[in-house]
């Protein structure tokens, strides 16, 4: 018997991921702004899916209120840009400030169990949304645009936003990847598999969950920042919408809850569905909701989890495998 | 005086929230699950009543009685097909499955009924128009009184059902320990399906009141769910009478907040909910925080 982490496939694939990131970086140089904007949307979905999976897949924390951080990140950007900061600096400041809000929120949110946590987070998102609606300077209920970005030529603006999205996505996914591979990661995966058993072995469950919650808070705030940079206009009804949670749940459940690669696959699938059914509409959402529910009931490990199980395939290894020594 | 009136109106509003929350509380008490589609089920009930009223011209209350068997059957089937399977798969699966169901119900309603808002206020006749000015600025509306009376009857009936009848005993036994209940010959699947059927029927009643007292559209469900859940938590999860009190407290908080500024209505309810959570969980744990971390 031998314990291994890397296989030849996973080495190739992890190296390949680096190459893909480099190739992606050249997208704005080679493609039209329309394609650049669409790819930015894909990156935002990947980031959101990975962060929701960090919470639910590894921390067992099912939140239907992560749109709180999305909305705060987006409105934070408009707020700080309003102070005369250069818009791209305002984005970073907004990310740090609104992401940090996850620390005080975690102090009490993490005391809640299952449904209380899920709906408690939703109520926090509602409170944040109402607070924005009450603020005339932020456009109240009608929305506001990040007009400071108009000073850039559209092609450059789209490229800068894309690179920022790529940087955020790479940083957050890499942070999660190395976190899961570290000794800390072993305890996180233990919590995923059985929280009580992990606690009895001396894992500091509360502290680990807080780490994931704060990471996801920053990640979702980053996604919010990118959304306002990508669309230039936001309104509380859309950035604080519970629909974001629906998307995140769909991507993670279909891709594979508690797997590293699954949510990325789920994000690509959702993006493909969104580009195919550009009209959106109720049937598309009926399909998303029904698919998410069916995956939760019938295929709880999602597409990637099932592939992993059947083929023993690991592309971005965060765990270990036991193999027979030949 | 206006504050006294606001509190009274808050009690009427809170009775409505208590009806919405009653089924949610029952399902949590019996199965330890929260149905995230509960608000959408209530709105679905409102649409069923709307269809009956529009096609027959009957009063909404009579239409609700006609719709009741369908709602009960829907709850029973929902449990046997979706929730039963979710229940066995861990604590997160029921939330995920019912969240998916919530999106499905909302968008099927959108497809069938368009995003237009509807109300049954006009077809309820004198019930919505009648009100009495009792004393100073204090007014009592017929609708408020009816909702309050119905809420009390629903909670009392459910209490009697659980404490005095055989099916009620079986339900409590199953809630206490499903495995032990199975051992003495109680079919937990049947008990759970019965609980969900009751919950869906009461949610439909909540939907009827929603439709009569204000307007609704296909995406009204999530807001109703949040209010209902807040009522359950404020009253203490797992306590039936607590849910009634929680609903009343939520209603009063909302109308008092609206006294300051109409836009503060929902906000003050949310803040009461968060304050209760912090006091119940945060306060205790802040003391322990140093020791645990």
Image: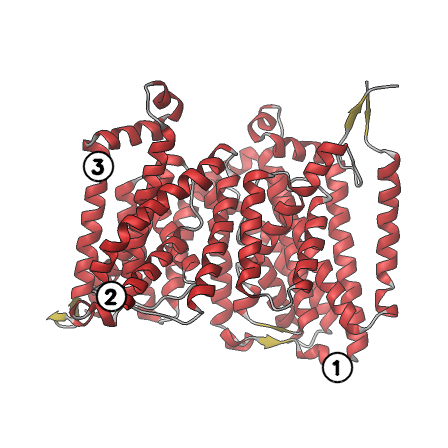
Q: Chain of mark 2?
A: B
Kind of element beneath mark 1: helix
Q: Position of residue A275 (x, y in %)?
A: 69, 64
Kind of element beneath mark 3: helix
Q: Residue at image x 49%, y 71%? A: A133
Residue B161, numbered label: 3
Task: Answer left or right for A315 relative to A52.
Answer: right
- Residue A20 in view in this figure: yes
Give a yes or no on whether discs 2 and 3 share a subunit.
yes
Residue at the spot of label 1: A151
Q: Position of residue A312 (x, y in %)?
A: 77, 32
Query: Residue A291, relative to residue A90: is it above or below?
Result: above
Residue at the spot of label 2: B56
Q: Residue at image x 51%, y 45%? A: B97
Q: Position of residue A311 (x, y in %)?
A: 76, 33
Q: Residue at image x 44%, y 36%? A: B84
Residue A74: which quarter of the image? bottom right
Q: Residues within 10 Å of mark 2 (few under 14, many from 20)?
A: few
Distance of label 2 from label 3 (alpha carbons): 33 Å
Front residue of A315 and A274: A274
Q: Residues within 10 Å of mark 3 (few under 14, many from 20)?
A: some
Distance of label 1 from label 2 (alpha carbons): 61 Å
Residue A98: which quarter of the image? bottom right
- Residue B252 in view in this figure: no
Give a yes or no on whether discs 1 and 2 share a subunit.
no
């Amino acid at each position: 018997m031998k314990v291994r982490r890397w296989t030849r496939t996973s080495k190739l694939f992890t190296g390949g991921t680096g190459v893909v990131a480099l190739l992606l970086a050249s997208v704005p140089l080679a493609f039209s702004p329309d394609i650049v904007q669409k790819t930015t949307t894909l990156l935002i979905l990947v980031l959101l899916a990975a962060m929701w999976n960090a919470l639910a897949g590894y921390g067992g924390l099912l939140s239907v209120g992560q749109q709180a951080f999305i909305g705060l990140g987006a409105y934070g950007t408009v707020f700080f840009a309003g102070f005369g900061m250069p818009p791209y600096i305002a984005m970073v400041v907004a990310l740090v400030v609104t992401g940090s809000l996850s620390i005080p929120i975690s102090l009490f949110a993490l005391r809640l169990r299952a449904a209380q946590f899920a709906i408690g987070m939703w109520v926090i998102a509602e409170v944040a949304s109402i607070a924005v609606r009450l603020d005339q300077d932020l456009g109240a209920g009608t929305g506001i645009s990040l007009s400071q970005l108009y000073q850039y030529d559209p092609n450059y603006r789209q490229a800068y936003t894309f690179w920022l999205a790529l940087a955020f996505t790479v940083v957050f996914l890499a942070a999660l990847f190395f976190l899961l591979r570290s000794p800390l990661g072993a305890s996180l995966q233990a919590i995923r598999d059985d929280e009580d058993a992990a606690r009895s072995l001396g894992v500091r469950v509360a502290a680990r969950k807080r780490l994931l919650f704060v990471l996801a808070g920053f990640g979702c705030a980053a996604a919010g920042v990118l959304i306002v940079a990508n669309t230039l206009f936001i309104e509380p009804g859309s950035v604080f919408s519970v629909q974001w949670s629906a998307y995140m749940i769909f991507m993670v459940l279909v891709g594979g809850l508690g797997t590293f690669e699954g949510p990325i696959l789920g994000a690509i699938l959702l993006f493909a569905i969104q580009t195919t059914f550009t009209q959106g509409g109720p049937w598309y959402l009926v399909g998303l909701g029904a698919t998410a529910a069916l995956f939760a009931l019938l295929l709880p490990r999602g597409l990637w989890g099932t592939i992993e199980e059947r083929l023993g395939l690991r592309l971005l290894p965060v765990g270990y495998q036991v193999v027979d020594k030949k | 005086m206006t504050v006294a009136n606001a509190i009274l109106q808050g009690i009427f509003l809170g009775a409505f929230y208590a009806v919405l929350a009653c089924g949610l509380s029952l399902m949590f008490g019996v199965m330890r699950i929260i149905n995230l589609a509960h608000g959408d089920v209530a709105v679905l009930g409102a649409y069923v009543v709307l269809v009956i009223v529009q096609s027959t011209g009957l009063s909404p209350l009579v239409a609700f009685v006609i719709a009741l068997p369908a709602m009960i059957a829907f709850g029973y089937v929902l449990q046997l097909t979706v929730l039963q399977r979710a229940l066995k798969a861990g604590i997160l699966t029921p939330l995920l499955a019912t969240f998916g169901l919530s999106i499905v119900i909302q968008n099927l309603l959108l497809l069938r009924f368009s995003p237009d808002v509807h109300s049954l206020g006009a077809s309820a006749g004198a019930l919505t128009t009648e009100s009495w000015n009792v004393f100073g600025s204090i007014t009592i509306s017929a609708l408020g009184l009816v909702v309050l009376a119905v809420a009390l009857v629903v909670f009392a009936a459910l209490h009697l059902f659980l404490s005095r009848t055989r099916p009620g005993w079986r339900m409590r036994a199953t809630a206490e320990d499903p495995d032990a209940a199975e051992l003495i010959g109680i079919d937990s699947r049947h008990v759970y399906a019965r609980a969900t059927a009751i919950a869906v029927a009461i949610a439909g009643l909540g939907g009827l009141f929603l439709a009569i007292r204000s307007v609704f559209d296909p995406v009204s469900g999530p807001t109703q769910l949040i209010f209902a859940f807040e009522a359950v938590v404020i009253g203490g999860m797992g306590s039936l009478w607590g849910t009634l009190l929680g609903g009343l407290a939520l209603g009063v908080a909302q109308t008092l907040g609206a006294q300051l500024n109409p836009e503060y209505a929902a906000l003050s309810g949310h803040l009461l909910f968060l304050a209760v959570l912090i006091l119940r969980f945060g306060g205790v744990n802040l003391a322990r925080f140093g020791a645990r971390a």
